[in-house]
Image (cartoon, rainbow, N blue to C red):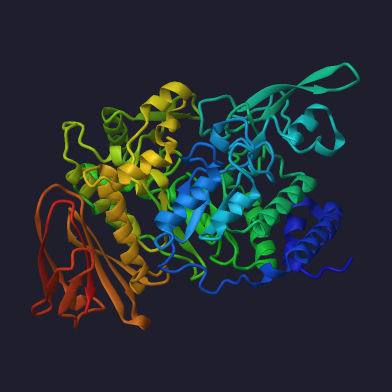
């Protein structure tokens, strides 16, 4: 057999051995040839300037904005084009495929658009104004999918697409992100009228059946799906719950070498035919494990979700102290210029607590959970190996999470200023910011939705009527108005400032315990920016010694956010920073 791509062949050899790898490789080459024949124009996508300071990602459901009589995806496309075409570069449409549960993450058909949302042309309409990010929900699939229904019929094609476990198997080492049972009993046909009970692997619940990547046929179907997404316009592909992908009895089934090798195979495949497409890994795990999905910086994900950031910023605002956040931020090194962080604070899910392991003490984590409960949020738990449970996720709207449980009558101006300070930290950090729809548009939590669905995560998933939303955005007295227009201003400033480029240098400055401070620099463009963010409700005097910084000779600074000018004297920049104030000081 002739092997034109030895690296991909070696991946298949590692995963499936010498008997199966040659056939799998031949089928994969045919798949790639067919894709390139159907999509000749996509070869133009390259890695050059994949992302810059102009890039930010809006995270949204396909039906987040609705208008009577119109497909939600069409409404979303028009709404976003009207309000954000000059501020957001990319739209991440959360799973818009037909699904059976979990608000889209139990996919019935990977390659179809849910008819209740619209059709592929509506997705492409969004792509006319923005770059597109799709979800690859490939750890599991819906129990209603054709694949699993074929398995239940004992169809030979799907017989090994799922993981069947014998009843007495010891699975005590398996990491559990839920308190639900790991295995689900199903009935599989075993004859014309007979059925046999089977236990199948379900990491996230009975309707989300884990896929068996030990099957090369399953892998090829998944790779074909990834290529299909690229053909439909995806430039970024989010690998959902990817850390659980490969299962091996006798291990914790988390971050296994085979999982990393599968991601490397996906990366090599895409680099070969569409090198401009980026993989983003979603791994809600401790920071050290999370960043392992960069690989060597060239062979795995181009971006990883920065999961420790959301709870650490909450901790900073709760305590009025940035020292833990700052010391952690000092560790945010990157293995190559091809890799960067996907920074986010809020999402369709809750705020993960597992990423705090090794950063915050257990008592500090418990304090976060208690405060969120005081603010009306929920705390979801996970099962531990010893049978106990522990906090896993905070379910609360991020704006609400920053509130004061002792004062439920705060003025909108204070709420907005505090919230925007948290968002400005995310925007200032090296990487690409991911902004959840409800954060950008100043939404509060939706506890009524939780009562209806019975799911804690629903608190941050409210769907909005376009006319009502736009009326509130136009109302200068509304919280939405104050947050949205100020947030959009920060995005405009970020786009125009080269020091915010993902490849620009980042240095954490320790200037005050309540002020998170960074120096962002792109020396080649002579762009330098000191970013100061007061996380407290107190005014502070801050002095920055410039003599030890790369900007030692700088004397004049302009605050991009407030247009105020500052003057350094004898290498010392002294200033006063107001409660929750943001200063982005550009060196002149």
Residue 326 as seen in the image, left or right of residue 195: left
Does residue 491 appear left or right of residue 458 in this picture?
left
Image coords of residue 513 (percent x, y): 17, 54
User: Which residue is depicted at the point 54% across and 34% down?
Assistant: 103
The answer to whether 507 appears left or right of 220 in the picture is left
Quadrant in the picture for the N terminus: bottom right
Q: Which residue lies at the image location 56% right of the left edge and 58% below the top edge?
A: 127
Figure check: 95 above or below 518:
above
Q: Quadrant of residue 547?
A: bottom left
Q: Quadrant of residue 145?
A: top right
User: At 70% from the left edge and 67% from the top edge, which residue is drawn?
Assistant: 273
Q: Quadrant of the C terminus?
A: bottom left
Give the residue drawn at x 45%, y 65%: 334
State the residue lying farthest toward the top.
193
The picture quadrant where one finds residue 428 is bottom left
On the image, the x and y values in percent for residue 510 come to: 21, 62
Q: Does the rendering let one see residue 350?
A: yes
Looking at the image, which is closer to me, 149 or 61? 61
Instruction: Residue 340 in the image: state x and y as whole percent.
Output: 46, 63
Residue 440, given in percent of the width and then of the height, sits at: 36, 49
Image label count: 0
Residue in the foreground of this view, choosing between 396 and 5: 396
The residue sitting at the front extreme is: 69
Q: Is residue 265 left or right of residue 555?
A: right
| Image: 310 above or below 503 | above
Task: Tell me if I can see residue 58 in this picture.
Answer: no
């Amino acid at each position: 057999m002739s092997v034109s791509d030895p690296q991909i062949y070696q991946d298949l050899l590692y995963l499936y051995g010498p008997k199966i790898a040659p056939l799998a490789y031949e089928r994969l080459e045919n798949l790639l040839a067919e894709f390139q024949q159907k999509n000749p124009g996509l070869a133009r996508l390259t890695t050059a300037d994949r992302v810059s300071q102009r890039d930010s990602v809006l995270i949204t459901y396909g039906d987040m904005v609705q208008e009577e009589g119109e497909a939600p995806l069409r409404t979303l496309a028009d709404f976003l084009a009207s309000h954000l075409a000059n501020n957001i570069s990319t739209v991440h449409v959360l799973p818009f495929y037909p699904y059976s549960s979990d608000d889209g993450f139990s996919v019935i058909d990977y390659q179809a658009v849910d008819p209740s949302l619209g059709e592929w042309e509506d997705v492409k309409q969004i792509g006319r104004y923005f770059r597109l990010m799709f979800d690859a929900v490939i750890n599991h699939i819906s129990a209603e999918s054709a694949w699993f229904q074929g398995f239940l019929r004992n169809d030979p094609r799907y017989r090994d697409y799922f993981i069947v476990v014998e009843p007495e198997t010891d699975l005590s080492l398996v990491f559990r992100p839920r308190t639900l049972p790991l295995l689900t009993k199903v009935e599989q046909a075993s004859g014309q009228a007979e059925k046999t009970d089977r236990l199948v692997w379900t990491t996230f619940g009975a309707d989300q059946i884990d896929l068996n990547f030990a099957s090369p046929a399953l892998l090829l179907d998944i790779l074909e799906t990834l290529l299909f997404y690229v053909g439909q316009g995806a430039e970024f592909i989010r690998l959902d719950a990817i850390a659980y992908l490969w299962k091996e009895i006798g291990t914790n089934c988390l971050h296994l070498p085979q999982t990393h090798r599968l991601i490397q195979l996906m990366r090599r495949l895409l680099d070969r035919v569409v090198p401009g497409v980026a993989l983003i890994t979603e791994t809600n795990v401790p920071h050290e494990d999370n960043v392992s999905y960069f690989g060597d910086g060239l062979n795995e994900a181009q971006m990883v979700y920065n999961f420790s950031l959301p709870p650490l910023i909450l901790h900073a605002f709760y305590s009025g102290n940035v020292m833990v956040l700052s010391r952690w931020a000092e560790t945010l090194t990157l293995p190559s210029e091809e890799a960067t962080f996907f920074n986010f604070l809020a999402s369709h899910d809750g705020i993960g607590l597992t990423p705090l392991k090794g950063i915050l003490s257990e008592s500090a984590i418990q304090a976060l959970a208690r405060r969120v409960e005081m603010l009306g949020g929920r705390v979801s738990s996970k099962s531990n190996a010893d049978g106990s449970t522990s906090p896993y996720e905070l379910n609360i709207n991020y704006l609400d999470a920053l509130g004061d449980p002792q004062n439920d009558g705060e003025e909108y101006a204070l709420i907005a200023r505090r919230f925007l300070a948290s968002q400005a930290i995310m925007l200032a950090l090296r990487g690409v910011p991911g902004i959840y729809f409800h954060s950008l548009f100043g939404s509060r939590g939706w506890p009524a939705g939780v009562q209806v669905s019975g799911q804690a995560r629903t608190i941050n998933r409210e769907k909005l009527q376009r006319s009502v939303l736009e009326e509130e955005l136009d109302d200068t007295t509304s919280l939405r108005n104050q947050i949205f227009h100020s947030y959009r201003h920060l995005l405009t400033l970020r786009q125009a400032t080269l020091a915010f480029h993902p490849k620009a240098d980042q240095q954490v400055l320790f200037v005050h315990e309540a002020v998170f401070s960074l120096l962002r620099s792109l020396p080649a463009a002579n762009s330098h920016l000191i970013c100061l963010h007061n996380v407290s409700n107190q005014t502070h005097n801050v002095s920055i010694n410039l003599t030890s910084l790369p900007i030692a000779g700088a004397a004049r600074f302009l605050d991009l956010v407030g247009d105020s000018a500052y003057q350094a004297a004898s290498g010392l920049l002294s200033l006063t920073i107001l409660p929750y104030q943001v200063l982005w000081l550009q060196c002149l």
